[in-house]
Image: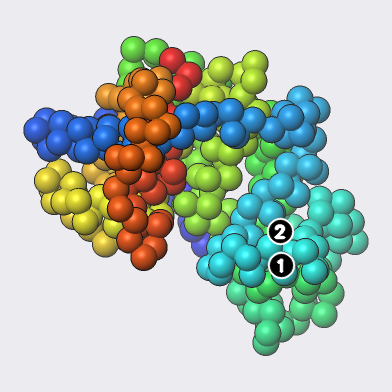
Amino acid sequence: MVASRTAGQVQARPTAKQIDFDRSAVDHTIRLIHQVCCLAGSFDLIEQFADEELATTIDRHDTAALFYRLMFDFSFQGISDRVAANYMARHGRPTWAAVRKNLARRPTRPKLKTYWQFYDCRYQKTRRTCAEPDHIGTCPLPSHRLRNGHLNQLTYSLYLFIRDVADGDLVGWIGDRVNEATNPDDPTSAARNSAALLDPLREIYGVSDKVLTMALSGILIGASAGRPRWLEVGVALIAVDTLVHNFLHRTGILTRVNAAHPYGSGCYRPGGCADIIRAVANQIDAQQFNRCASSAERVKTAPRQTFDPREEPGALAAHAGICAGGAQQ
């Protein structure tokens, strides 16, 4: 078990372990997803993630740059990507230096003293209220022009986590968890490292599992050149959105493995969508997809699109990274 923090209390969260699904149900799922990847899987997904600027940030242990990147990624929640991007283009986003300067003024608000004290803030941008109204006049949270009060809280929760939990070096903190001793013969090894990385970060205010997983996988894969463990853990991170969940539901996969559940936190619980995807990915070598079909064959045999191309089976490969799982092997 690992500890989690909610309203200042420590709760238990189950650690990663291998789930035993019905073998025939898994075989059916593997056949279905294998065909999806042959038709719609990316030929060079890992290469698409490569990011020289990010790699330089990691090499330099540039916490400020990584904070700025994460604030960008975390802003894409609860609204369309276009609206979120346009808002940031007009109003900018918080920087490490700006938050550090604000906290250096020693605001009177007790919740801002440490990461562990910053919970139940309840700052609301439109009403300009919070859980400690006597201090809001000197509180630095409202000084950032963000889309909503949740993002203001997220900004300071993330900053305090990096400062207090990661000792100001987020790159080093990530590396320590990614490089923990593992057993290469254990299929749950990368998943356990993923949990060691994600579970503490899940306690940062206002970050959804999906957005956190996507942001961290982008960092680990994008900066994986010369860091094989980063790639191994990065491709083991699984983000489940409504498209992925609905694919597993509509194809009957959830029913076959006796794991029917509504979209939400259940997707990440033992036996949920993430575990199903992980079980399938462990059985598929992604290197083979370059040989499944030529470009012409992929076009000729591709399934007819519905009114929304995101609902096509290929969306699973794009969102869940199924077709990336074996690329590094």
The image position of residue 309, as x and y in percent, is 40, 57
- Front-most of 62 and 238? 238
Using the rendered image of the protein, determine whether residue 23 is visible from the camera's viewpoint.
yes
- Left-right relation of 28 to 105: left
Label of residue 222 in the image = none
75 displayed left or right of 3: right
Q: Residue at x 58, y 45 (%)?
A: 215
Q: Is residue 108 shown to the viewer in this render?
A: no
- Residue at position x 56%, y 17% from top? 228
Q: Position of residue 135 (x, y in %)?
A: 77, 77
Instruction: List the single residue furthest toward the bottom.
Output: 127
Helix, strand or loop status at disc 2: helix
Q: Look at mark 1 in the image and give the residue it sits on.
A: 86
Relative vertical location of residue 212 with respect to residue 175 in this rendering, above or below: below
Query: Measuring 90% from the left and 61% from the top, which residue is drawn there?
Result: 105
Residue 313, given in percent of the width and then of the height, sits at 31, 48
Residue picked out by circle 2 = 156
Q: In which quarter of the image is residue 129?
A: bottom right
In the rendered structure, which amino acid carries the disc numbered 1?
A: Asn
Q: In this view, does 171 lie above or below 260?
A: above
Q: Distance between the residues labelled 1 and 2?
A: 22 Å
Looking at the rendered structure, the kind of residue marked 2 is Tyr
| Front tag of 1 and 2 | 1
Compared across the picture, whether 146 is left or right of 75 comes to right
Q: Quadrant of residue 21?
A: top left
Residue 183 horizontal/vertical position (percent): 39, 14
Q: Is 58 positioned to the left or the right of 283 in the image?
A: right
- The quarter of the image holding the N terminus is top left
> Does 85 appear above or below 285?
below
Query: Element under label 1?
Result: helix
Q: Quadrant of residue 245?
A: bottom left
